[in-house]
Image (cartoon, grey):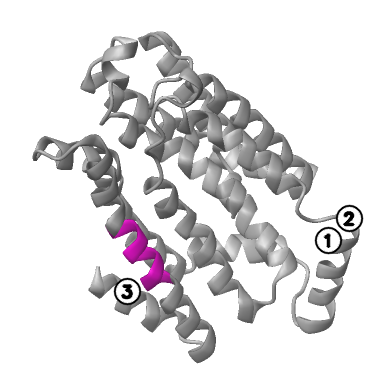
Amino acid sequence: MLTFFALQLDKTNLSSAMTTTFIKDIGIINDIVNNGNQLLLAVTVIFEIPSNMMLSKLGAPVCLTLECFSWGMVATFQAFVNNKSCYYATRFLLGLFEAGYLAGSLFVIGMFYTKKETALRMTVLYTANYLAAGIFNLDDAAGLKDWQVPFLGSPLINISALTIFSDRDREIMSRRIIFKDCARGVELSSTVQYCYIDYYIWLYALISFISLVPNRRLLLYGPIIIRNLGFGKFKANLLASVRNFALVSLAVIAAWVSDKAKLRGPTCFACTCTS
């Protein structure tokens, strides 16, 4: 969750930076911000499948570690962009190195938790998106501009996450799955092919698409819209974060109910209707 939090911090801190002097300082306009944001998403989509193919060849621990290190370095240099070209370059590289990380994270969760435990853990993973969107507001730290501080935070989070579990801890967690989830089998190519024709998967994908399309714009422009209503930078970011923390609470409750009642579909449908 910590590394995914850092990933989402890289993506969402741009919205908070727009409430500061970020655009003026690097000499760009809103259209360039939009183009850079779309560039990151487009590159992520393009390299999603190649990244997951590499993950299956190298293994999740090796591949995800390389990705965390790579995007952490790029995220650090975001704090020092000073023109349009640097801005586009960092957004492109972030999309390149962050592609495939979400799927890899879900795979790692499946390695250490049983089927009955995965829903709540995956929800906690996804809530990192909204928590990251609600955290900003460090002004002029160590002589830096206020928009530079969040860009320097994700590498520290990535490094701390790599030291949480020892080799022995990972061995114990893996063995626990073998004993508690005996029904888990080896993935076959026929299983993967079946996923492409399973209409339930396409239905869930459609629901996610419908919910994410408007949400991305709101995450990007929410703080600046609130600030244009007359609020200061600090209060605008605080007000924009309220919905995110409310969504976290709802998501955790829904995941807990889903695990206990074992009703995934109805729970997802209820959340969709609520939203």
- Tell me which residue sits at (24%, 41%) in the image: 223
Per the image, the residue denoted by label 2 is 167
Identity of the residue furthest to the left in this view: 229
Q: Given this view, does label 2 or label 3 mark the residue nearer the observer?
A: 2
Magenta segment's dominant SS is: helix
Q: Nearer the viewer, residue 193 or 5?
A: 5
The N terminus sits in image quarter: bottom right
Q: Is residue 205 visible?
A: yes
The C terminus sits in image quarter: bottom left
Q: Secondary structure at mark 1?
A: helix
Q: Secondary structure at mark 2?
A: helix
Task: Give the percent coordinates (x, y) of residue 95.
Answer: 50, 31
Do the numbered discs 2 and 1 sit on residues whose CB atoms are within 8 Å? yes
- Tell me which residue sits at (69%, 44%) in the image: 160
Q: Is residue 205 magenta?
A: no
Per the image, the residue denoted by label 1 is 170
Per the image, the residue denoted by label 3 is 271
For residue 188, side relative to residue 246 (left or right): right
Span of residues in magenta: 243-251
